[in-house]
Image (cartoon, rainbow, N blue to C red):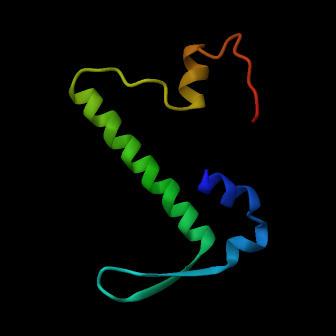
Amino acid sequence: MKIDNYLSLLRPDDLCKRVSRINQDGIKRNTQVKDVLIHVIAEELHHRGEIIAILWQMNIHPPDMGWLSIMKNGSAMGMEIRIL
């Protein structure tokens, strides 16, 4: 909910704003909002890949995890797509 609110109010100019964080080593690091958002996406993809690898090791076929695999399998046939 908090993330949805933040993203819904985000404007293109906000992507270039600087944000800072003090890491565990005590050093303050600065970066732009757009770089943080890209990093969050990359981290999510990384962990998704780890989950898929674990499923494969267990001989379990992972579920469709994106539009490409859904379209390839024909799972989207007759599916109604709604944008919320």
The quarter of the displayed image where residue 13 is located = bottom right
Quadrant in which the C terminus appears? top right
Picture residue at 49% right of the left edge, 63% below the top: 39
Q: Could you tell me how many numbered marks the image carries? A: 0
- Left or right of residue 16, residue 69 in this image: left
Q: Extreme front residue here?
A: 1
Residue at 29% in and 84% down? 25
Q: Position of residue 35 (x, y in %)?
A: 56, 70
Relative to 5, residue 66 above or below: above
Residue at the far left in the pictured view: 58
Left or right: 76 as drawn, with respect to 56: right
Q: Is residue 32 above or below residue 64?
A: below
Q: Position of residue 48 (x, y in %)?
A: 40, 42
Point out the residue furthest to the top here.
78
Q: Tell me what residue is drawn at x 37 percent, y 41 percent.
A: 49
In the image, 74 versus 40, the foreground residue is: 40
Tell whether 13 sits left or right of 58.
Answer: right
Looking at the picture, how far across and down is residue 55, in whole percent? Answer: 28, 29
Q: Quadrant of residue 23?
A: bottom left
Q: Nearer the viewer, residue 61 or 9?
A: 9
Position of residue 42 relative to residue 80, above or below, is: below
Rendered residue at 76%/34% (across/down): 83
Q: Position of residue 18 (x, y in %)?
A: 62, 82
